[in-house]
Image (tube, helix red, strand yellow):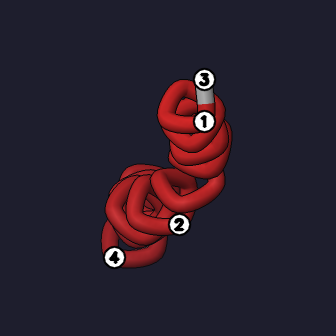
């Protein structure tokens, strides 16, 4: 039972540990996608 509870604790901690790399990977991509139309408008004028 102790091994199972340890595995469950690790499983619950995993999303919190995963969220940081996910944000670091996705956020720059989202910012780039959001910035592209603005840059295009500014360069087109």
Question: Residue tagged by mark 3?
Answer: 1
Q: Which mark is residue 31?
A: none
Q: Which badge, 3 or 4, is on the more N-terminal residue?
A: 3
Q: Which badge, 2 or 1, is on the more N-terminal residue?
A: 1
Q: Residue placed at 54% from the left, 46% from the top?
A: 10
Residue 28 visible here? no
Label 3's element?
loop
Quadrant assignment for the C terminus: bottom left
Rendered location of residue 19, percent (x, y): 55, 54
Question: Residue tagged by mark 2?
Answer: 20
Q: Are marks 2 and 4 in contact (CB under 8 Å)?
A: no
Question: Residue tagged by mark 4?
Answer: 43
Mark 3 to mark 4 CA distance (whole Å): 63 Å
Q: Are marks 1 and 3 in contact (CB under 8 Å)?
A: yes
Rendered location of residue 36, percent (x, y): 37, 59
17 left or right of 45 in image:
right
Q: Which badge, 1 or 4, is on the more N-terminal residue?
A: 1
Instruction: Choose mark 2 or mark 3, whichever is in front.
Output: 3
Mark 1 to mark 3 CA distance (whole Å): 4 Å
Mark 1 to mark 4 CA distance (whole Å): 62 Å
Query: Are there few (<14), some (14-19), or many (20+) residues within 10 Å of tag 1?
Result: few
Instruction: Choose mark 2 or mark 1, whichever is in front.
Output: 1
Question: Residue tagged by mark 1?
Answer: 2
Q: Are marks 3 and 4 in contact (CB under 8 Å)?
A: no
Query: Are there few (<14), some (14-19), or many (20+) residues within 10 Å of tag 3?
Result: few
Quadrant assignment for the N terminus: top right
> From what the image shows, is residue 38 above or below residue 34?
below
Viewer-side residue, 13 vs 6: 6
Q: How many marks?
A: 4
């Amino acid at each position: 039972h102790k091994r199972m509870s340890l595995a469950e604790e690790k499983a619950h901690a995993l999303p919190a540990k995963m969220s940081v790399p996910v944000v670091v990977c996705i956020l720059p991509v989202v910012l780039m996608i959001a910035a592209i139309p603005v840059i295009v408008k500014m360069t087109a004028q």
